Image: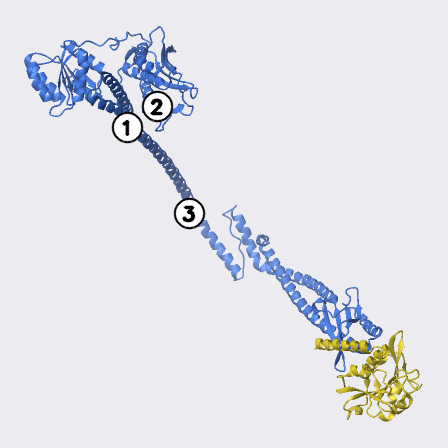
Amino acid sequence: MRRWFARLPVHRKLVTSALLVTGVSLVMAMLGLSVIDALRYRAGAREDAVALARVIAENTSAAVAFRDADAAREILASVRVRDVVTRACVYLPDGTLFVGYSTRTGVCPQTVPEDRTWVGVFGSAVISRNARAQGSVYVERDLSDLRGRLLVTGIAGILMFIFAATAAYLLAQRVHAVVSGPISALAQFARSYGDNPQAEPPTLTTAPDEVGDLVKSFNEMLTRVRTTSADVTAANRELKRSNEALQRENEERRRVETEREAALSREREANRLKDELLAAVSHELRTPLNAMMGWAQVLATATPSEETIRKAVTSIVKNARAQTRVIEDLVDVSMIATGKMRLNFQPLDLRSVVASTIESMETVATAAGVRLEQVVPRDSCFVAGDRDRLQQVLWNLVSNGVKFTPGGGTVSVTLMRQDQEIRVAVSDTGIGISSSFLPHVFDRFRQADGSLTREHGGLGLGLAIVKELTELHGGSVSAESEGRNRGARFSFVLPELSVEVQEEQSTEETALPSLAGITVFAVDDNDDAVAMIAASLASAGAQVDTFTNPVDALAAWQQRRADVLVCDLAMPHMSGLDLLCSIRRLDSSRGVFTPAVAVSAHASEQHQAESLRGGFQFHLPKPLHQDALVRAVAEAAAHT
Amino acid sequence: MLNACRFLLIVFVGLVSAHVRVEGQAIPDEYRLKAAFMYQFPQFVEWPSTTWEDAQSVQLCIASPDPFGSELEQLVRGEMLNGRPLLVREIAGSDELVGCHVLFVGAHSDVAAPVLKAAAGRPILTVGDGDRFLENGGIIVMKIVDGRVRFEVNTTNAARNGLRISSQLLSLALTVREGPP
């Protein structure tokens, strides 16, 4: 209703207002008058009823006194002329109905009624004679004639409204011409202004009232609007530009935030992996250490039996190898990760790598009750690669297979040529890999079972190293498994070296050289280390003098010399390099040359290069491999 | 006030009915109803104003023998008319008429003729139930019609005694006679 009114044009509003005001005032006035009339009429009706009751009481007093019901009824019947009377009842002093006049709208109750049981208005009177109550009279009348009066008032009101509305309408039309005419003209101009901003405003002659002010103000405003609209347009353009910039900035900020979150989660993951690694590393290092310590303590007892000693030594060697393996893996991973892994590429036949791997794993596999098989082509399979590293790759895969294959199973290595590539597949009949873990099998420090109670030890580095090394060779790795207990198959593929090159004769296949008749000076500040060196060389037939202090060794050298010097690099009082320097000086004065083998826990290439520059012929990383030491000493001895 | 009146009335009716039960044999029903009429009539009659100047009470005189027994006496006990108490008195002869305002002469009264004759011309409302009571100068005669007590009025006799009968009472009368019989 309000909206409808708000949408009306001004002159309609004026007319509507006039009609509304007229109508409302008329209705209010009529209502007020009707209410007053009704109230007064009601009061009159009540007086009327009372008066009628009194008349009846007076007239029926004798009839009541003599209990002449017929006479009383006749008197009552006279009220019939008043058709508004609905009931007239006469009661005896004891409250019982004497006579009653009834119409269709009501009958007299048998006893004196309570006031509220009467409909409409009623009046009552006491019949008394000689100051004694003889009975009572009740008269009820309805207000049906009031309804008629109100209807007449209503009709009169409607007629008056029609007259008043017509008058108000005519008057409002006249007022419109004066008041809203100029406003309508202004509004029409304002509407057309949007289409034609250059149009001139209508010239209006107006009275000096608010409407006149409005027209004047409108014209002034129009002038101002024209001058400012250009500014507004420019400001709008500027606002849009800055909005866009703001949006770009927001996007940038959001992007940075996303990146930051990603980095944070990466960092968190790395942290978690680092923690896991530390736990695994310490576990892997400690386990063999425990075994070694245990056996060492057994050996330290007074008189261990021959059998015990053999068992102890076997176990200690096995565990030391395992620990070495762990440390080498760690070093490899670290070197690969820091990009310091240097590969010594040369043409090599993968068949020989497979053969030597199978050979070296044979003992372990037999011990585990696992059969090893190899399928190799008749033709040579040349690739460009680092023999040691490729051997490591294959060794990792085969030992992995053996590790995860229960007794009675088979691990087979298959070598094949296809499309300028050499494929090496290692398949086993072991516990297999679940499909959920399969994608992560080559990740660093990942094992299918990460729990503390896992059955299979290891750092989870073997396959990671396989992947990294293969990729450094320009190849790729893959793993497949049909699920738990269905076995697994790992393969790596390397590009085939098309030009057939004679492979370098492998030294490893030859038997260990004899060191018979060769004298060696072994120097290491660590008693165990020097004892181990001595034992290894002595087993190959060499004669070894051991020193734990380089100064003692130099002093001894002045008395006698040896064919080969095996020397630790980092020692107190004198470094291995200084010792070699002094010995070489002594040698040159005697006209001899002593080849030297450096052994060091510093296994990096940098250290290696440093010691070779310093005059050593060989650099062997610690922990020492017995065979490597014997070969190095044999080769060094050949130098002289 | 109305309630109190109603209460008194109930007590009164109770007393009456109790009496009727006790002396039902002595007082015929007819006279019980007539006694009620006797009590009502004076209220619709206007005496000359001089009548009340030295009267201390309103006396209802019953020509001997009294057929109402104690009925009428019970009815009027404590009642007032024109500010004076109502009294019931039995008279044996016309010489006892002095002071009477209403005189009832029963059909079987021993002293009917002389008393009625003596009352004529005096301001006494004469009421009776004899067959020729109005012809003998009485004003109101009660009759039994269809088991109900009705009455006839002779306004000439009333005017002769200086009494005015209320039109309401007249409207209830079986017949209203005017002029001498």
Q: Position of residue A175 (x, y in %)?
A: 60, 61
Q: Quadrant of residue A385?
A: top left
Residue located 41% across and 42% down the image? A243
Residue with the mark numbered 1: A282
Residue located 85% across and 85% down the image? B66
Packing grade of label 1 (10 A; few <14, some 14-19, many >=20) is few
Tell which of A381 and B33 is nearer to you: B33
Type of residue at label 3? Asp
Q: Position of residue A62 (x, y in %)?
A: 81, 78
Chain B shade in the render? yellow
Packing grade of label 3 (10 A; few <14, some 14-19, many >=20) is few
Residue with the mark numbered 2: A456
Q: Earlier in the sequence, mark 2 or mark 1?
A: 1
Q: Quadrant of residue A55?
A: bottom right
Question: CA gap, disc 2 to disc 1?
Answer: 15 Å
User: Is A215 positioned to the left or the right of B177 in the image?
Assistant: left
Residue with the mark numbered 3: A231
The verdict on a common chain for dots 3 and 1 is yes
Tell which of A322 and A375 is nearer to you: A322
Tell me the SS state at disc 3.
Answer: helix
Type of residue at label 1? Ser
| Quadrant in which the N terminus of chain A appears | bottom right
Tell me the SS state at disc 1.
Answer: helix
Instruction: Report in which chain the residue with disc 3 lies.
Output: A
Instruction: Report in which chain the residue with disc 1 lies.
Output: A
